[in-house]
Image: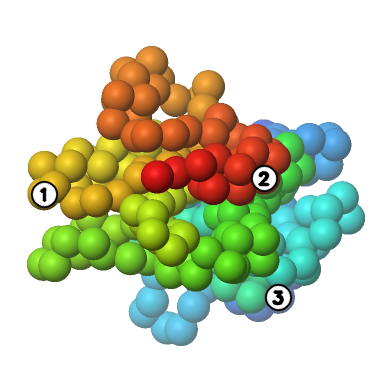
């Protein structure tokens, strides 16, 4: 039963751990790990159906704590929480963090789960990830709202048979070459945009390329040089594109 695992932890941690039986199938593990505000991290060990592995869970306490400081229910916020949890190696479903484990790896799994809980509950991490997740949404909204007269097409594949060479947006003015617009938030997307531009040039496509960065300076020098040498135009952040993008597109020949 779950209590057996609690007793195992007590033997491994000694006086640094305590346990409390919350339900017949749920035991709270009191560990010397704290949230940013000094409160103890909430960790419970749960026995699933007979014969199935034990599960570590936060019983929904982590998301509840985070909601005291941030709006976790706004559109897209659940996806942010799920991504942070997934990157930390735990599952997130209906606001509850869980980690299934085998009986012989309780200690390392517990350490992994505690780190995951503290990361998900970090206000700084959550707010940063929300801002990052909004970059593509904000770029999409600007293109479809402010540049709608340019007949924007999303997720365009200019080269038949090369679906991996996808353009975020194709913008068209009568009598001009199409503008292939890429939103770049990280190193991987920067390199993909560069590869796309290189392959389009090798195929003699008529186009003008434009890259809108979330934060140009966050890229390594190698990646900055790569996109600079292959793209026709770059905007160092979304604010600059909002301010000058329309004028630049109008000057494309």
| Near-viewer residue (199 or 173) | 173
Residue at the spot of label 2: 242
Image side of residue 8 versus residue 38, left or right: left
Q: Is residue 170 above or below residue 227?
A: below
| Near-viewer residue (223 or 148) | 148
Going from the N terminus, do you reach mark 2 or mark 1 first?
A: 1
Residue at the spot of label 3: 23
Which image quadrant for residue 178?
Answer: bottom left
Of tags 2 and 3, the one toward the viewer is 2
Residue at (47% x, 47% y) in the render: 183
Of tags 3 and 1, the one toward the viewer is 1
Secondary structure of residue under mark 1: loop
Which image quadrant for residue 175?
Answer: bottom left
Secondary structure of residue under mark 3: strand
Image side of residue 180 versus residue 96, left or right: left
Image side of residue 82 versus residue 205, left or right: right
Residue at (23% x, 62% y) in the render: 158
The furthest residue to the bottom: 49
| Near-viewer residue (216 or 22) | 216
Q: Gap in Å between the C-alphas at discs 2 and 3?
A: 55 Å
Q: Position of residue 170 (x, y in %)?
A: 40, 60
Q: Badge 3: how crowded within 10 Å, few (<14), some, or many (20+)?
A: few
């Amino acid at each position: 039963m779950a209590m057996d695992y609690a007793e195992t932890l007590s033997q491994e941690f000694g006086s640094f751990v305590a346990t409390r039986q919350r339900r017949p199938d749920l035991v709270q593990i009191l560990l010397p790990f704290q949230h940013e505000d000094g409160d103890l991290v909430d960790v419970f060990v749960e026995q699933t159906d007979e014969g199935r592995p034990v599960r570590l869970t936060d019983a929904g306490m982590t998301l509840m704590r985070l909601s005291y400081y941030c709006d976790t229910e706004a559109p897209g916020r659940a996806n942010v929480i799920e991504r942070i949890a997934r990157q930390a190696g735990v599952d997130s479903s209906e606001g509850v963090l869980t980690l299934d484990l085998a009986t012989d790896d309780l200690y390392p799994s517990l350490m992994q789960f505690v780190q995951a809980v503290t990361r998900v509950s970090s206000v700084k991490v959550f707010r940063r990830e929300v801002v990052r997740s909004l970059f593509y949404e904000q770029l999409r909204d600007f293109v479809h709202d402010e540049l709608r007269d340019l007949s924007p097409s999303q997720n365009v594949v200019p080269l038949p048979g090369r679906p991996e060479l996808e353009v975020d947006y194709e913008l068209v003015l009568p009598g001009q070459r199409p503008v292939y617009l890429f939103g770049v938030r990280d190193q991987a997307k920067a390199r993909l945009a560069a590869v796309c531009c290189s392959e389009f040039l090798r195929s003699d496509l008529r186009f003008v390329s434009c890259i809108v960065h979330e934060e140009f300076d966050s890229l390594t020098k190698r990646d900055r040089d790569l996109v600079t040498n292959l793209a026709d135009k770059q905007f160092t952040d979304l604010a600059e594109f909002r301010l000058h993008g329309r004028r630049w597109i109008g000057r494309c020949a």
